[in-house]
């Protein structure tokens, strides 16, 4: 973990306290802010450091397979079950189970997880016996789970089980000075990984790091550094303008103001909708790293419709590929 800002130091101090305990932890923060890295820090600084750290993306588990993924199965439990298969919970025994994107769990998945958290008992599919495990739960969400409980999208009783300890991972824009440190760290990593001479950043680029709000956070910064490092012709990395291809669409929208005196209601509404769609699509493509299929899944819509909307709003997905 790299940083020296006040927000970063406050976070690391809290990580040290949480690591010394053994209760469930809930991490909340924007996409790309480093929640999994925080979860690993909690694990490896705690007493379970020598035991497994098992990460699972809850949003990637199909609803019909949630019990099989978590609890495993016994031979003959269903067609094609030719042997015993341990679940993620058994794999994480004595260690830490990291539930990333826990907000993406379906209602059935939430009930399944809640039942396990109540007493740490579970039953693999096809096994008549109950099993018990000793595992620490660390969950993460890029949505505010308390707000989701108010709308009925997340179970309140499950939130109470997960939120014994809580840590809000700050976005990169709130970590003053850390963007430069992280960029230099990623440049060194890129140099070593691809066996290329180390490159430095032009002063104007370093200034831009601090002025840009990084909607994709550390993941966006890492991807930007790797791309610019590999494509730069000389030993110095310099952005060509103050508005690079992946500029912050959110800031651009905020700076624009509708001239109501010159627009009727329909025109003003159409412009506001266009601005919103461009901002939403840019953020979506950052999270999906330019993959339209992944973006459609994140948005909960059909790929064909999203593709048409991207084309309509002039979004170039190549700017977001990584």
Image: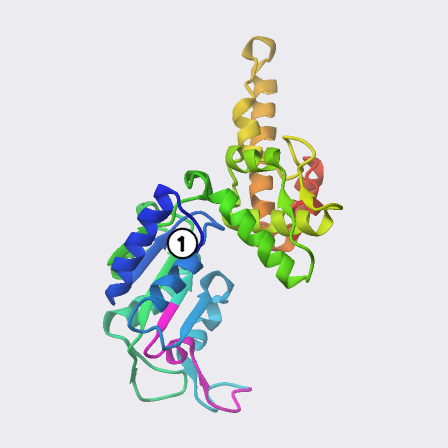
Residue 269: x and y, percent?
Answer: 56, 23
Residue at the spot 51% in from the left edge and 64% down from the top edge: 60
In the displayed structure image, the side of residue 147 where residue 274 appears, left or right: right
Q: Nearer the viewer, residue 242 or 64?
A: 242
229 vs 208: above or below: below
In the displayed structure image, the side of residue 59 where residue 234 appears, left or right: right
Residue 280: x and y, percent?
Answer: 56, 39
Residue at the spot 62% in from the left edge and 57% down from the top edge: 190
Q: Which residue is mark 1?
A: 141
- Name the image quarter holding residue 310: top right
Q: Nearer the viewer, residue 61 or 256?
A: 256
18 vs 85: above or below: above
Residue 106: x and y, percent?
Answer: 42, 60
Residue 293: x and y, percent?
Answer: 64, 55
Asked if one can make out residue 29 in the rendered structure from this viewpoint, the answer is yes
Residue at the spot 33% in from the left edge and 89% down from the top edge: 128
Q: Which residues fall within the magenta stretch?
A: 80-97
Asked if one can make out residue 157 in the rendered structure from this viewpoint, the answer is no
Q: Secondary structure at mark 1?
A: strand
256 vs 177: above or below: above
């Amino acid at each position: 973990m790299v940083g020296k800002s006040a927000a970063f130091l406050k976070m690391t101090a809290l990580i040290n306290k949480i690591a010394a305990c053994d209760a469930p932890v809930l991490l909340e923060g924007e996409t790309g802010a480093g929640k999994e890295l925080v979860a690993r820090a909690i694990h490896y600084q705690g007493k379970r450091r020598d035991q497994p750290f098992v990460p699972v993306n809850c949003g990637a588990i199909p609803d019909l397979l949630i019990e099989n993924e978590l609890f495993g199965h016994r031979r003959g439990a269903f067609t094609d079950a030719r042997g015993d298969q341990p679940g993620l919970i058994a794999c994480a025994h004595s260690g830490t189970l990291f539930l990333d994107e826990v907000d993406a769990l379906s209602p059935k998945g939430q009930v399944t997880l809640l039942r396990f958290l109540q007493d740490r008992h579970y039953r693999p599919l096809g096994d008549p016996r109950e099993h018990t495990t000793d595992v620490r739960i660390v969950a993460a969400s890029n949505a505010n789970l308390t707000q989701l409980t108010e709308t009925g999208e997340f179970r309140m009783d499950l939130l109470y089980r997960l939120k014994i300890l809580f840590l809000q991972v700050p976005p990169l824009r709130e970590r003053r000075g850390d963007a430069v440190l992280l960029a230099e760290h990623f440049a060194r990593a890129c140099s070593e990984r691809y066996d290329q001479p180390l490159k430095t950043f032009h002063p104007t680029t370093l200034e831009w790091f601090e002025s840009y709000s990084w909607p994709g956070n550390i993941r966006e910064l890492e991807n930007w550094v790797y791309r610019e490092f590999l494509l730069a012709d000389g030993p110095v990395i310099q952005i060509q303008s103050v508005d690079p291809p992946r500029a912050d669409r959110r800031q651009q929208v905020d700076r624009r103001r509708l001239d109501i005196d010159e627009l009727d209601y329909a025109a003003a509404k159409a412009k506001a909708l266009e601005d919103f769609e461009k901002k939403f699509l840019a953020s979506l493509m950052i999270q999906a790293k330019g993959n339209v299929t992944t973006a459609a899944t994140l948005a909960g819509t059909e790929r064909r419709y999203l593709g048409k909307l991207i084309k309509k709003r002039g979004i170039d997905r190549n700017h977001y590929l990584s």
